[in-house]
Image: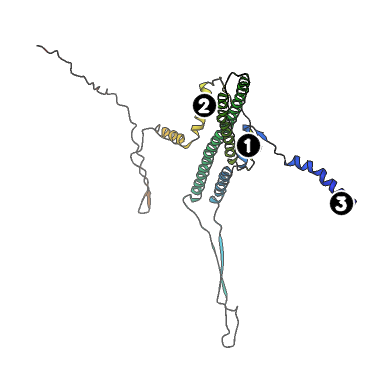
């Protein structure tokens, strides 16, 4: 009997601890914490990083030399007896052979270069994907802050309207307004209640969208973010805004292609007229002399200037 009593007391003593453990705790995260969780748990970024690792592994595989092949062939083994004589290994002879694939014309180097370029493409694609996802994450984070501000404004509006209702109730008791006017004012409170409900639902939806970006299943009521969401009168200088924009655009493929095109336009205008050809005749190797074209000189003749003149209007005589 005493043992059962001790068990009951133990269970009763553990109930408050369980209630405290199950109580929802809201965690407020800053932008740096949200960004850190996103980079650690986002499945799309993890898959892209795995693709980069695979491309780097293919670089090692592409530059490997082929292994030599050693084969040993045996023939002439007697399988069945012949004239009551069976000597299976008497006529067996072995033929060893070794083969090795020799790649010419720098095939290994070309494979390595192709694998390195594939890795560079994967890294560039991952950087572009990271930039896009961070932009979406920042937009979702600001959306949560905006919905919190809207919810706070709706709460202040309904609190102020309740104060207005209390004042009008006192006026009704004093006989300043009629019952119909008081009922009309109380019915208008439904609009503020609807705004408050819409703001609450919008805030919950924004939190769910933010949690979805890093595949987190935390309930929306146990998750919150903090950050500045006020108007800033400080205007940054143009150079501070221009430099990050140029650094971001230069890392994209479009700007890289434009730079390559501009660099190719600076090639000198002197080109060889004929290419050097190696020819063999009667066992001799002949190399033609080098023939280069002369550099292009700018023309010193002035170009004609074409001017268009409209005919002048003549006065009409009577």
Which residue lies under the disc numbered 1?
Answer: 36
For the residue pair 222 and 43, the one nearer the viewer reads as: 222
The label nearer to you, 1 versus 3, is: 3
Which residue occupies 67% across, 35% down? Answer: 27
Q: Residue at x 54, y 41 (%)?
A: 126
Question: Which corner quadrant of the image does residue 134 belong to?
Answer: top right
Which of marks 3 and 1 precedes in the sequence? 3
Q: Earlier in the sequence, mark 2 or mark 3?
A: 3
- Pointer 2 with pointer 3, Cβ within 8 A: no
Asked if 27 appears above or below 72 in the picture, the reply is: above
The 10 Å Cα crowd at callout 2, few under 14, some 14 to 19, many 20 or more, is: few
- Which residue bears the numbered disc 2? 243
Q: Decide: marks 1, 2 in contact (CB < 8 A)?
A: no
Residue lying furthest right: 2
Q: What x and y, as percent, mark residue 63?
A: 54, 50
Q: Quadrant of the C terminus?
A: top left
- As helix, strand or loop, the secondary structure at mark 3 comes to helix
């Amino acid at each position: 009997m005493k043992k059962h009593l001790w068990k009951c007391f133990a269970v009763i003593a553990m109930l408050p601890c369980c209630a405290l453990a199950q109580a929802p705790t809201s965690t407020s995260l800053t932008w740096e914490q949200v960004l850190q969780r996103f980079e650690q748990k986002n499945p799309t970024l993890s898959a892209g990083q795995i693709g980069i690792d695979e491309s780097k592994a293919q670089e090692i595989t592409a530059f490997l030399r082929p292994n030599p092949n050693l084969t040993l062939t045996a023939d002439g083994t007697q399988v069945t007896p012949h004239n009551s004589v069976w000597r299976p290994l008497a006529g067996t002879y072995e033929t060893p052979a070794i083969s090795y694939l020799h790649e010419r014309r720098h095939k290994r180097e070309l494979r390595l270069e192709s694998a390195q370029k594939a890795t560079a493409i994967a890294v560039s694609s991952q950087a572009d994907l990271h930039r896009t996802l961070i932009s979406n994450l920042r937009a979702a984070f600001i959306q949560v802050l905006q919905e919190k501000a809207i919810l706070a404004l709706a709460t202040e509006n309904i609190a102020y309207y309740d104060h207005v209702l209390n004042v009008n109730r006192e006026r009704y008791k004093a006989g300043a307004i009629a019952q119909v006017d008081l009922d009309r004012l109380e019915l208008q409170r439904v609009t503020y209640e609807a705004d408050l409900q819409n703001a609450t639902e919008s805030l919950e939806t924004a939190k769910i969208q933010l949690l979805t970006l890093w595949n987190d299943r935390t309930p929306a009521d146990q998750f919150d973010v903090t950050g500045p969401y006020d108007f800033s009168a400080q205007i940054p200088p143009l150079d501070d805004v221009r430099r990050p924009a140029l650094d971001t655009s230069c890392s994209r493929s479009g700007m890289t292609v434009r730079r390559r095109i501009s660099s190719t336009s600076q090639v000198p205008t002197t080109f060889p007229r004929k290419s050097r050809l190696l020819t063999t005749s009667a066992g001799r190797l002949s190399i033609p002399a080098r023939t280069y074209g002369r550099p292009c000189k700018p023309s010193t003749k002035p170009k004609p200037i074409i001017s268009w003149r409209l005919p002048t209007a003549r006065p009409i005589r009577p």
